[in-house]
Image (tube, rainbow, N blue to C red):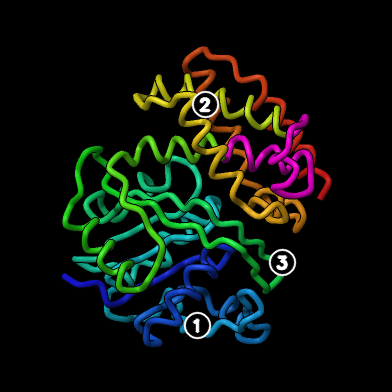
Amino acid sequence: MEIKTVAIIGLGALGILYANHFAKRMAPGDLRIIADQGRIEKYRRESLYCNGEKCEFFFVTPEEKTTPADLIIFTVKYNGLKGAIVAVKNQVGENTLILSALNGITSEAIISEVYGPEKVLYAVAQGMDAVKEGNRLTYAHKGFLCFGDREPGKVSEKVKRVADFFTQMEFPYLVDTDMPKRLWGKLMLNVGVNQAVAVYGANYGVIQTEGEARTTMIAAMREVIPLAAKEGVTLTEEDLNYWLEVLSKLSPEGKPSMRQDIEAKRPTEVELFAGTVIELGKKYGIPTPVNQSLYEQIKALEAQY
């Protein structure tokens, strides 16, 4: 069954980036941006811009009855996930597929509890360096969406269906046959880059060159490796170097989401990063001092809002 209609929920950096890409290639109504009435009015009043270009989006409220979407993409922050799951209810039909581009390693399982694991594919957004300030998004690299089945070693018809659609849309993607490892690798990256840049300030440039920020970032990332092993996922120094290579290609002026959150005085995703590492460290009796320190420093920054 061919994918023809898409619903996106969450117009942060990733949501705007993806929605703007699809909006140029899809008819209004085939691409639906799900948002409550208050947000829709704000977006219409102030407009949204992507690299200086005004975005033209077709909005649908959670209450509106429409035909189900063939594909739903979640691009909300983790603390908005539960509300978003409820908000897309009218978009979910018998053959709807769901991708979650959220950070962390738990969003797919949470969505699956409500809509069923058979609808959910696992996904990781990587390589984008977008910065959202107010209603304006700027980026140098769009990155790509990496996705696949939950079980390693297979490529299902559902994955092929999404891949065909992305090819048709000229949307950058990669099908991965070991998504658990990819999710843990992205967690390892975020635990390092998001938190180190949040604490040391500035932008990607601060961790792309040698110094205290980069040393702290790599030390925080290394704490994830033994925890992943306990959870049945093998991460190695080679994997760590792969993610450092991903990082090296981002615009030095770009900023990870946590730094953007702190500058905008929004709640961060520290519980998703250091919080997860500390919790698993306690569970398995593995010390995680670097993440403990970053956790405390980020909480202190949030307390200053």
Main structural element of the magenta stretch: helix, strand or loop?
helix
Span highlighted in magenta in the image:
190-213
Q: Residues within 10 Å of mark 2 (few under 14, many from 20)?
A: many
Q: Around disc 1, counting alpha carbons within 10 Å, would you say few (fewer than 14), some (14 to 19), or many (20 or more)?
A: many
- Horizontal side, residue 256 vs residue 201: left or right: left
Residue behind mark 1: 57
Tell me where residue 109 appears, x and y as whole percent. 35, 44
For marks 1 and 2 on the same chain, the one whose residue lies earlier in the sequence: 1
> Mark 3 — residue?
133
Q: Does the rendering let one see residue 266?
A: no
Residue 45 position, x and y percent, is 66, 86
Residue at 27% of width from left, 42% of height from top? Answer: 177
Image quadrant where one finds the N terminus: bottom left
- Residue wearing tag 2: 224
Other-residue count near label 3 (Cα within 10 Å), few / some / many at <14 / 14–19 / ≥20: few
Viewer-proximal residue among 5 and 178: 178
- Under circle 2, the secondary element is helix
Q: Callout 2, which amino acid? A: Val
- The number of numbered discs placed on residues in the rendered structure image is 3
Determine the CA span between mark 3 and mark 2.
31 Å
Which of pointers 3 and 2 lies earlier in the amino acid sequence? 3
